[in-house]
């Protein structure tokens, strides 16, 4: 059975949703960031990076959301969560998810985790002030690329739970959601999916 280490309100939700979508057998292991579970020896033995998500498989541990999503899609190909038979189309999926991971999520992290990049309080405060603009610029890119009704067009893929997860943070990041009607419509469309509702309920019930 797969084992997903997660914390509430993090990008681990994307992999959680994907696991539900494909009908995988999995166990959830909740970490508390408030208790700094991610820095404790037991978890660092699983994921030395000290972050979530981490997915424990029969072959070893995987980390980084784009890799976990690709793994789920490839392990459960019948679910059709990625165009595995088309190298170019699959690369487009990976390109989109890599942008979410390496650019959008990093811009978002400047709001709460500026200490990763600076020590001076004024520098951290400057990063925080920039978040509505920097995250908004990222969502402007996403808005232009959204094919609709799903990220890749008519087919729901591993891009969709990932975008849904990050789009849930827009208001807290100070982003003017009125500028991004396609992103907001996509967020609502994802929220109506049974797998998304189940994953959110499971994480809420574990609280």
Image (spheres, helix red, strand yellow):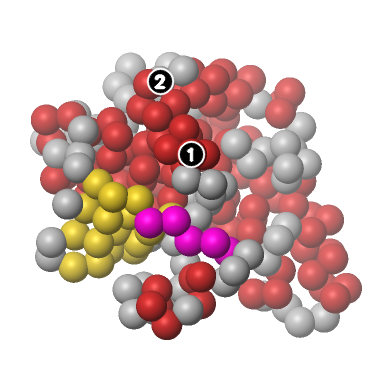
Quarter of the figure with residue 181: top right
Instruction: Measuring from the top left, give residue 88's x and y in whole percent.
Output: 22, 40
Q: Does the magenta stretch include residue 31?
A: yes
Residue interval drawn in magenta: 29-33
The CA span between labels 2 and 1 is 18 Å
The residue to which callout 1 is attached is: 205
Q: Is residue 50 among the parts visible in the rendering?
A: yes
Measured along the vertical axis of the image, is residue 185 above or below residue 115?
above
Residue nearest the observer in this picture, 94 or 75: 75
Residue drawn at (21%, 53%), measured in percent from left and top?
A: 2
171, 135: nearer the viewer: 171
Determine whether 159 is above or below 190 in the image. below
> In the rendered view, would you say 148 is above or below 145?
above
Mark 2 residue element: loop
Residue 175's disc is: none
The image position of residue 44, as x and y in percent, is 40, 78
Residue 32 x/y as whole percent: 54, 61
Residue at left 31%, top 38%? 18
Disc 1 secondary structure class: helix
**Foreground of the two, 168 or 125:** 168
User: Where on the picture, by quarter, is residue 154?
Assistant: top left
Q: Is 115 on the left or on the right of 9, as rendered? A: right
Mark 1 neighbour class, 10 Å CA radius: few under 14, some 14 to 19, many 20 or more: few
Specify the label residue 193 is tagged with.
Answer: 2
Q: How many labels does the image show?
A: 2
In depth, the one of 14 and 5 nearer the eye is 5
Residue sitting at x 47%, y 67%: 51
Task: Say which of marks 2 and 1 sits in front.
Answer: 1
Is tag 2's residue or tag 1's residue first in the polypeptide sequence?
A: 2
User: Would you say the magenta stretch is mainly helix, strand or loop?
Assistant: loop
């Amino acid at each position: 059975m797969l084992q997903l280490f997660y914390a509430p309100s993090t990008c681990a939700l994307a992999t959680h949703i994907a696991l539900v979508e494909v009908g995988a057998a999995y166990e959830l292991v909740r970490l508390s960031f408030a208790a700094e579970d991610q820095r404790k020896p037991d978890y660092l033995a699983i994921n030395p990076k000290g972050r979530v998500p981490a997915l424990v498989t029969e072959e070893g541990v995987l980390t980084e959301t784009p890799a976990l999503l690709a793994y789920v899609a490839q392990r459960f190909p019948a679910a059709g969560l990625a165009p595995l038979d088309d190298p170019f189309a699959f690369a487009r999926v990976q390109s989109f998810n890599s942008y979410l991971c390496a650019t959008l999520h990093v811009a978002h992290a400047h709001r709460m985790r500026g200490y990763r990049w600076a020590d001076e309080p004024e520098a951290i405060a400057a990063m925080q002030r920039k978040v509505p603009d920097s995250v908004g610029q990222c969502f402007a890119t996403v808005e232009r690329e959204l094919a609709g009704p799903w990220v890749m067009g008519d087919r729901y893929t591993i891009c969709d739970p990932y975008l849904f997860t990050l789009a849930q943070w827009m208001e807290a990041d100070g982003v003017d959601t009125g500028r991004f009607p396609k992103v907001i419509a996509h967020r609502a469309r994802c929220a109506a999916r049974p797998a998304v509702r189940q994953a959110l309920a499971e994480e809420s019930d574990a609280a």
